[in-house]
Amino acid sequence: MSHVATDRPTHAPASLPSSLLNTGIFPYPSLADIQLTAARLSNQVLHTPVWHWQAGNALNKLAAGTEVWLKLELFQKTGTFKLRGALNCISPMNPAARQRGVVAVSAGNHAMAVAYAARLAGVSCKVVLPRHASPTRINACRQDGAEVILEVDMHTAFALGQRIVEKEQRTMIHPYDGPLTALGTATVGLELMQQIEQLDAVIVPIGGGGLCAGIASAVKQLAPHCAVYGVEPYGADAMYRSFQSGQAEKLKIVDSVADSLCAPYVMDYSFRVCQRFVDEIVRVTDDEICAAMVDLYHDVKLVAEPAAAVATAGLFGPLRDQLAGKRVAVIVCGSNVDPGRYAALLERGMQENEEVCV
């Protein structure tokens, strides 16, 4: 697999219109595009910190000599990385499109980010969420002025979102697909590589693949030797299955505690970018995710939602041996979880950790 772009222009205008990006002329983010995007977003997003994980019981799960750095994107405005893509998608909209407004479909985090970005831009916003979505996320969308519509599940939510696009001519701000989204998420990877030198590997959680596509494109163009691993829950493993089959796959059922990773299908753009730049996709169980939440809470004092613990679960589980003795960065991507649910998931994680230690 070739990891460095050589067959496309290396520069794009700072205000590249989405109509041009979506033609396929720019098949994946170039380093120049990523740097321009980071500069454009610099006054709107936080430059999130990294943390060297040096103490705690969880480190006993690692092979000797493994050095772990956490990229704390859960400290981003709105509580997740999603704001980067949302801002980057709304920014180039023309006046007519802004007048019609935007729509987003999400388990919550992306909806929050789009509602926030739309409020900043003075754009009308509708968000479609599944009925089981976190009340905290729903309330945050409403507080930013979005109209919230609840549907049975993510499949029906996506279908309704598309009908709204067709009926009202709103712009769909997709939660994980498209060049503008990838350019936004790529700024996480750009920051990370500026913060930590000589990384051997980066581990990224995967839902639809937008975060992993962006980060991987930045990492591989800056450091081709650095491995990029994606981690998915077993109950929402569309990207893993897509890597196995060689084409974008759909899931009939998605079921995981990591609800914000429960994308029902992979779309072509994110899949192709991940396929080009990501070395391997691994999967973790819900119990392993909950155990990683406990590790992040006890050792690092982080309140990480399940999706944000997935990369950590991958480090302690299926990636442990192959990353032995390596300098590894782990993306901790979000913190939007209701207190009651968080407590229940911690309890489940503590039981899993006790069973592992027995």
Image (tube, grey):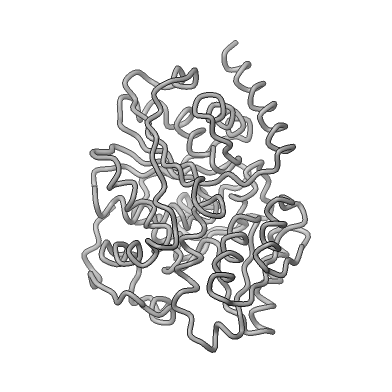
User: Can I make out residue 2 in this image?
Assistant: no
Q: Is residue 35 above or below residue 199?
A: below
* Residue 271 in the image, given as x and y percentages of width and height: 45, 59
Residue at (62% x, 57% y) in the render: 264
The quarter of the picture where residue 235 lies is top right
Specify the quadrant that holds the C terminus: top right
Residue lying at 34% horizontally and 46% vertically, measured from the top left: 192
The vertical placement of 69 against 189, above or below, is above
The residue at 69%/77% (across/down) is: 163
The residue sitting at the top extreme is 358
Residue 156 image position (x, y, % from top left) = 73, 65
Instruction: Give the tally of numbered discs.
Output: 0
Relative side of 43 to 132, left or right: left
Residue 249 point in image, percent of width and height: 55, 58
Query: Can I make out residue 17 in this image?
Result: yes
* Residue 214 placement, left or right of 158: left
The x, y position of residue 60, in whole percent, is 45, 17
Above/below status of 336 relative to 164: above
Q: Quadrant of residue 302?
A: top right
